[in-house]
Amino acid sequence: MDSALAKSSAIEFAPEQLPAHIGVIMDGNGRWAQARGKHRTEGHRAGVEALRRLITCAVEFDIKYLTIFSFSSENWQRPQDEVNTILGLMKKFVASDVGTFVKNNVRIRILGSRDGLSASVLKMISDAEGRTAHCTGLQLNVAFNYGARTELVDAVKAIAARVADGSLGIDEIDEEQLSSALYTAELPDPDVIFRTSGEQRLSNFLLWQAAYSEFVFSEEFWPDFDRTSFISLLDAYANRKRRFGCVG
Ligand code: FPP
């Protein structure tokens, strides 16, 4: 991310045309690398650069919440060297960029299960969250060790425990109760979910929260994502008519 971000932009969107919350599935790192005869891990390295460009754009356009799918609970099943590379990149990213986040008022939150994470990963999480806790600009949510079905199961268990101990009645269980038992409790639902690489699926990302999200898909692989891609995403969103089940 640039340390000094230009706030001025030639492209103008009215504030009500902009999404408050963007979810991003950064897909296609491996295919990007393979298409260049490189090892898949090179794609992840290039993916971090694309992520920096995304964050820079989100700050520039005053987006309030950005949620990125960085590592799913299923990603542990990838080859060990690839898992190690992604974890290493994340640690390096937090260590090298957290100062710039603070300078740009970016708050980091990590969404996902903490069960079974190593001490070094837990430290990375607490460093990133702790050092940016006071920031009030863009909130960057990193979905890590995240799976939406597990998130829902955990939420149901938490609600069931409250019913069992008598602090919550069955009739009091509603959408709000369930939303507030998710990792995303304090976040508004994503207005738009964006996925690169031509795949058009959610892959266990924000299943509950995406009920009324718009979906935008692009053919480019994640490492090719740049400011032009971001503006195309904003443009696509600005042209959608959201009705939330009503008549418009
Ligand atoms: C999808 O591409 C990408 C991932 C599973 C990991 C995303 C990780 C990064 C961008 C780097 C590290 C993250 C942070 C937060 C610094 P893929 O490997 O599934 O690509 P493919 O579908 O072409 O195989």
Image (spheres, rainbow, N blue to C red):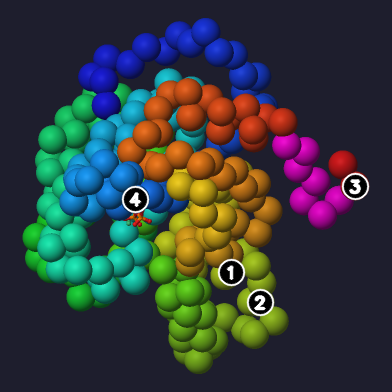
Q: Is residue 131 left or right of residue 233?
A: left
The number of numbered discs placed on residues in the rendered structure image is: 4
Q: CA distance from mark 4 to mark 2?
A: 47 Å
Question: Which quadrant, please, contains the N terminus?
Answer: top left
Query: Where are the magenta residues, as a range?
Result: 240-246
Q: CA distance from mark 1 to mark 3?
A: 27 Å
The answer to if 227 sits in the magenta stretch is no
SS of the residue at dot 1? helix
Work out whether 40 lies above or below 227.
Answer: below
* Residue 83 quadrant: bottom left
Query: Mark number for residue 31?
Result: 4
Q: Mark 2 or mark 1: name the one nearer the start of the chain.
A: 2
* Residue 60 quadrant: top left
Q: Is residue 129 visible?
A: no
Pointer 1 residue: 177
Q: Residue 211 location, x and y as percent? A: 65, 59
